[in-house]
């Protein structure tokens, strides 16, 4: 269309005469021509003028701005220290259960039913796990199997060795004369221990300031070098090791673990009862543990030590060691220990009490030593195990 308009404009310049309607090509729209009196003149379209910037329609912004208001959150830097007053928070903290709530719970009939059922179940469990100690004839509560006690002993042995390494201690090698002395005595005691099937391991720790020895369940023997000057010879060492082996033969470790269950059950029951009746439960929890230990834990520990003294004395006598050396050892131990606490506050009998009891048992121990052929007869250990399974006593 634009090319046709250009042609017409060129003709008008060359031959300026009016245009008739018939001379206008059909391709030219009538909108491009306008009449001027009786003539048709060519209408040249006016050029487009740009719209001023201020009059341009606003462009759409996507996404449209939100009309919601936002809060500015100030984040503290990680390195800025935050101080918390724990003492004030603890002082202002509210208890989970108030005294009134505990009193209402104690008076509730459902609570009474729960208490009766729990006490009945505890009593049934307690009486089902009672047994008689053959030597002393006392009845004890023991709910742990030998396998469980052995696993605990192996775990404790790993912890002891870890602590020795952490503190820079040293376990003496097998060729050391002190290690050979301990292994020599153990080799004679094990056949008479009634536990010859255990995997025995002997560790002698270099520590001249510690006079101690113990045997963990599973046959793990630990002897500190500080006790060797007190035992002086194989007979004195046999008295110490026989005593420690006797703790395992009588399963005193399992008894202590079982006792902790009963003591904790009783103590926390007293704590709840004290809270229900308005007493201070935390005071009962703090002082109740000490009272339980003095009333039950330490007396039982002293009984276990006396039983181990008797069993160990008979064991060393059957292994052809002189049982009279046990008295001499405890006399040397009494002279070495100064400031011994009162017996009722201790977990062990006093040295004088031990000496007196061992002197009472000496005639029977000497008789066993004379009757023994120093072979692997395990007479007393086998007798002890049979009596324990049957729940009867043996003559002490």
Image: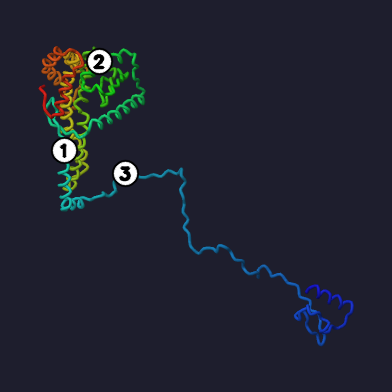
Viewport quadrant of the C terminus? top left
Residue at horizontal 15%, vertical 22%? 383
Pick whichever of labels 3 and 2 is earlier in the sequence. Answer: 3
* Nearest the eye: 114 or 132: 132
Crowding near the residue tagged with mark 1, few <14, some 14–19, many ≥20 C-alpha atoms within 10 Å? some
Q: Is residue 124 above or below residue 350?
A: below
* Nearest the eye: 92 or 16: 16
User: Secondary structure under badge 1?
Assistant: helix
Crowding near the residue tagged with mark 3, few <14, some 14–19, many ≥20 C-alpha atoms within 10 Å? few
Q: Name the residue at the bottom extreme.
A: 38
* Residue 240 in sight: no
Q: Nearer the viewer, mark 3 or mark 2?
A: 2
Residue named by callout 3: 87
Give the label on residue 29, or none. none
Q: Nearer the viewer, mark 3 or mark 1?
A: 1
Is label 3 in contact with label 2 (beta carbons under 8 Å)? no
Is label 3 in contact with label 1 (beta carbons under 8 Å)? no
Pick whichever of labels 1 and 2 is earlier in the sequence. Answer: 1
* Nearest the eye: 80 or 353: 353
Give the label on residue 185, or none. 2
Residue at horizontal 76%, vertical 75%? 46
């Amino acid at each position: 269309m634009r090319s046709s308009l250009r042609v017409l404009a060129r003709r008008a310049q060359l031959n300026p005469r009016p245009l008739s309607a018939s001379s206008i090509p059909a391709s030219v729209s009538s909108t491009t021509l306008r009449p001027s009196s009786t003539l048709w003149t060519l209408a040249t379209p006016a050029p487009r003028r740009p719209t001023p910037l201020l009059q341009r329609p606003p462009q759409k912004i996507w996404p449209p701005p939100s009309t919601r208001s936002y809060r500015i959150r100030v984040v503290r830097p990680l390195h800025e220290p935050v101080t918390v007053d724990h003492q004030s928070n603890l002082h202002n903290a509210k208890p989970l259960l108030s005294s009134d709530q505990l009193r209402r719970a104690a008076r509730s009939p459902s609570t009474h039913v729960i208490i009766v059922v729990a006490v009945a179940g505890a009593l049934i469990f307690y009486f089902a796990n009672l047994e008689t100690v053959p030597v002393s004839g006392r009845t004890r509560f023991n709910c742990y199997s030998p396998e469980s006690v052995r696993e605990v002993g192996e775990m404790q042995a790993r912890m002891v060795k870890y602590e020795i390494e952490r503190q820079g201690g040293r376990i003496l090698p097998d060729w050391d004369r002190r290690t050979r002395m301990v292994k020599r005595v153990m080799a004679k005691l094990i056949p008479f221990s009634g536990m010859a099937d255990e995997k025995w391991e002997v560790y002698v720790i270099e520590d001249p300031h510690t006079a101690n020895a113990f045997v963990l369940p599973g046959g793990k023997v630990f002897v500190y070098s500080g006790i060797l000057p007190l035992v002086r010879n194989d007979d004195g060492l046999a008295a110490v090791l026989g005593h420690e082996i006797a703790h395992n033969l009588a399963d005193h470790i399992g008894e202590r673990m079982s006792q902790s269950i009963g003591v904790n059950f009783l103590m926390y029951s007293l704590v709840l009862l004290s809270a229900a009746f308005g007493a201070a439960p935390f005071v009962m929890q703090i002082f109740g543990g000490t009272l339980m230990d003095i009333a039950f834990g330490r007396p039982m520990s002293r009984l276990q030590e006396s039983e181990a003294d008797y069993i160990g004395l008979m064991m060393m006598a059957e292994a052809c060691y002189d049982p009279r050396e046990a008295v001499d050892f405890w006399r040397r131990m009494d002279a070495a220990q100064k400031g011994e606490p009162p017996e009722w506050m201790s977990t062990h009998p006093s040295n004088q009490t031990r000496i007196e009891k061992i002197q009472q048992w000496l005639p029977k121990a000497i008789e066993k030593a004379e009757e023994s052929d120093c072979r692997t007869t395990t007479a007393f250990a086998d007798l002890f195990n049979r009596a324990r399974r049957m729940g009867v006593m043996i003559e002490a």
